[in-house]
Amino acid sequence: MSSSGILSQAQMLIDGEQYDKAYEMLTNAYDKLKDDAEYLEKIALLAKSMDKNEEAVKYWEELVAVDPNSLVAYSELLDIYINTNKYKYYITRAKYKILNEKVSQSIDDYNKALGCTTEENEIINARFLLAKAYEYTNKIQNAIDEYYSILEHKNDMAIYYRLADLYTSQGDRYSAINILERGVKAFPDSNELSEYLSGLYIKEGQYEKALEYARNDYSKTKAYLMMGNNEEAFKILNAIEDRTNANYYALFAEYYFNLKDWTKCLEYIEKFNEIAPQNPLTFQMKALVCDANNDSYGYHYNMGKCYSYKQDYELALAEYLNAHRTDASKSEAVKEIIKINEASGDKTSLMEFYEKLSRQEPDNPMALNGLGDVYADMYEFKNALEYYKKVEKIDSSYYDIYKKLGYCCEKLKDMASAKEYYEKYLAKAPLSPDTEKLKEKVAKFANAPALTAAATEEEGLLDKIMRIFGK
C-alpha cells in the first residue's frame, strides 16, 4: 500500500474511533514512512491522544529532524519539555521564536538553556546555536566569543574555519591568520584550513609563509608568481594535467604578465573567460594589462566591467565615467553608463549620454530609442516621434517601436497614423497583453481624419501644458 493509502486508511480508523487499530497500522508502517513529515505528525498526534507520551515525544522529535520548520512539532514539544527537561524546553522555545522571525528573542532562551545543563555535548550545542543567533543579529564579537567557548570543550575544525570567516568579514586579517594557525596545528592534515591560511598570507604579502602552507599546485604557483619566481611557477603549471580548471589559465595569464608578454597574457585571459564567463577577474586582469601599457581608458573601462559583474554599480559607474573623461570619442563606456542609469532611473543623465551616444553612433538604436523614451516622458511627443521613426528605419524587427509610434501619434491627435502603427504592432505581436486594448483603439480610429502639422503641434503643446498643471 502506498504512503497516502496507509495514511488515508489510518484516518478512516481514527474517524471511526478505532484508535488502537489505527495506531497499530501506523506503527507497522514506521520503517517505510519514518522520513515522511505527514506520517510523523499523524502518529505523534494519535500517540498523544492515547496518552502514549514517551512515544509522542519520540515522534515529535523525529518530525523536527525531518521538517525543521514544523511549528506544530515545536509547540507540542514545548508543552512536554516544560515539565520534563528545562534544557530542551529553552532550546526548543528559542527555535520556535526563530521560526516566528524573532531571532533576537531567542538569544535569552539559549543562555537560559546553558544554565540548565552540565552535559558537555548539550553545552556545545547551545553555544553553537547561540553563536549563530548572534551572527544573524550582527553581534559578531558575541558570536566570536561563543565559538571560542566551544573550542574550550572540543577541537572542531569547522569552528576554526567559521572564526576565520568572521574575522575576515570584519577586515581583521591578523586575527583570522592567528586562529587558522591554531587550527592547522590542531588538524595538521586539513588541506582546507592550510589553503585558507595560505590565501590570507598571499593577501598580506607574506609569500614565503603562503608557500609554507600551500597544499595544492595552484596555491604554490600563485605564491611563486607573487615572489617573482617565474621559473618555479612555470614548472608547476606545465606539470598540471587538468586543463579544465579556470585557475590554470588565470595563473598562466599572471605568469605572462610577469614576463610582460601582453599578447600571451591576453590570450590566457580569454581562455580563462571561456571557462569562467562573466567572472569579474577577467576584467580585473585586463585592467592591469591596460594599466601596464598606459591605456587609461582601457583600465577604467575594464575596472567598470569588473565592478558591474560584482554588482557594485556605484563603483562601476565611477570607473565608466573616468573612462569617458579619458576618451570621450569611444562609445563602450557611454553604453555602460546608459545601462546603469536606465536601471537607476536617472533621466537627466540618460538624456546627456543618449545624446552623446547618438553623436558617436548616429544609427545606434539604443540611443535613438532612449531619446524617444525620454522625450515621451517629458510629453514632447513630436520630438519622441522623430527619434522613434529613425529606430523604425534602422531596426524594423523591434516591433515595440510601432506601439510607441502609435502612442505618440495618438497623443498628437493624429488618429489615422496611430491606427496604422497600432495595426503594424498587432500584426507583429498578436499575443501581446495590450492586444484587446489596441484593437479597440484601432476600431475607434477607423474613420479618424489625419490632422495637419499645425494641429498636431497645438495638441502636443496642450498635453504638455496639462502635464505641468497636473504636477
Image (cartoon, grey):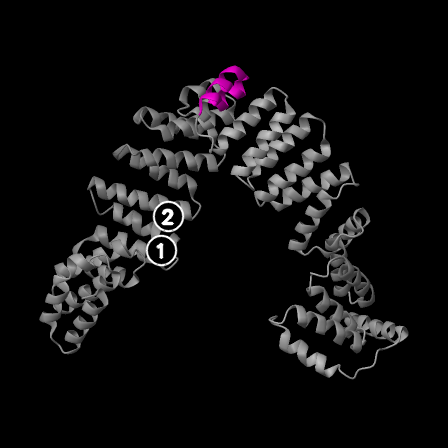
Q: Classify 10 Å Cα crowding around label 2: few (below 14), some (14-19), many (20 and above).
A: many
Q: Is residue 223 magenta?
A: yes
Q: Quadrant of residue 319?
A: top right
Q: Quadrant of residue 36?
A: bottom left
- Which disc, if any, is residue 139? none
Q: Nearer the viewer, residue 59 or 28?
A: 28
Q: Quadrant of residue 183?
A: top left
Q: Classify 10 Å Cα crowding around label 1: few (below 14), some (14-19), many (20 and above).
A: some
Classify mark 2: helix, strand or loop.
Answer: helix
The quadrant of the picture occupied by the N terminus is: bottom left
For the point 55% across and 39% down, the residue is 279
Query: How far, Cα to Cα, is label 2 from label 1?
Result: 9 Å
What residue is disc 2 on?
Answer: 133
- Height in image: 212 above or below 153? above
Picture mark count: 2
* Residue 396: image location, x then y, percent: 72, 61
Q: Amino acid at mark 2?
A: Ala
What residue is disc 1 on?
Answer: 98
For the point 31% across and 54% down, the residue is 95
Q: Which residues are magenta?
A: 221-240
Classify mark 1: helix, strand or loop.
Answer: helix
* Residue 158: image location, x then y, percent: 33, 36
- Height in image: 275 above or below 65? above
Magenta stretch: helix, strand or loop mostly: helix
Q: Amino acid at mark 1?
A: Ile
Check if mark 2's residue and mark 1's residue have beta carbons within 8 Å.
yes
Q: Is residue 361 magenta?
A: no
For the point 81% across and 51% down, the residue is 362
